[in-house]
Amino acid sequence: MLLRRYGDSIQSVVTRFDPRAITEISFRRDQVESLSLEEFEARYEPVRESRIGGETHGDVQSEAEAELLRVVEAQLQELLGELREGEVLLVENRQGVDYPKLRDRKEGVIVEGENRLRFHWRVDPQLRLGLYRRRDD
């Protein structure tokens, strides 16, 4: 299960990665799980942190950006697929503090005698995910 903090509550979310959106890496609450921060901290203990990011490049800006989001989504789904019974992933990045954003750099190149642009995309800062395990009661 994927969780994210909203104020003083922890709620389950699903990914909503969209290259056309202002915030390309976002999450939507799915109403499956909701805990207060205190309940979450009492129920789960941190195990480790993973960082997801990557870089892509291409000749078409939107295609390179969309490819980077596919890479990040695949990495996240791989982590979710490795979860064991009683484990959850928590998005550790905080809105307005260190929220992951796609950044681009353009490079001028000459292809067959014509000036072209090459687009380089990266996630900065990376998406941080905490793996938490249910405490033994």
Image: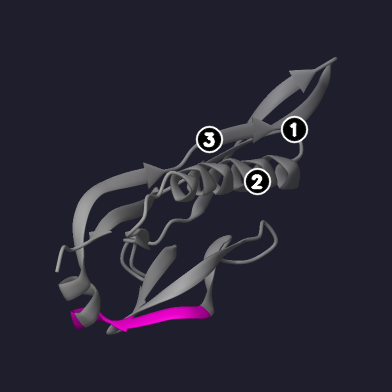
Q: Where residue 62 appears, x then y in whole percent?
A: 73, 47
| Dot placed on the residue nearer the N-terminal end, 2 or 1 | 1
**Residue at horizontal 18%, vertical 63%?**
135
Look at the picture and state if 34 lies above or below 81.
below
How crowded pointer 1 is (Cα within 10 Å; few <14, some 14-19, many 20+) is rated as some
Q: Report whether 70 appears left or right of 99.
A: right
Q: Report whether 133 appears left or right of 80.
A: left
- Residue 18 lies in the magenta stretch: no
Going by the numbered disc 1, the residue's amino acid type is: Asp
Secondary element under disc 1, as helix, strand or loop, is: loop
- Residue 33 lies in the magenta stretch: yes
Asked which quadrant contains residue 100, the reply is: bottom left
Asked which quadrant contains residue 7, the reply is: bottom left
Which residue position holds label 2? 65
**Residue at horizontal 49%, vertical 46%?**
81
Magenta: main secondary structure: strand
Secondary element under disc 3, as helix, strand or loop, is: strand
Q: Nearer the viewer, residue 120 or 24?
A: 24
Name the image quarter holding the C terminus.
bottom left
What range of the chain is rendered magenta?
A: 31-38
Instruction: Please identify, in this view, whether the residue under mark 2 or under mark 1 is nearer the observer.
Output: 2
Going by the numbered disc 2, the residue's amino acid type is: Glu
Mark 2–mark 1 Cα distance, whole angstroms, equals: 11 Å
Q: Report whether 115 appears left or right of 39.
A: right
Q: Which mark is residue 55?
A: 3
Asked which quadrant contains residue 107, the reply is: top right
**Residue at horizontal 33%, vertical 67%?**
94
Q: Nearer the viewer, residue 90 or 20?
A: 90
Q: Which mark is residue 59?
A: 1
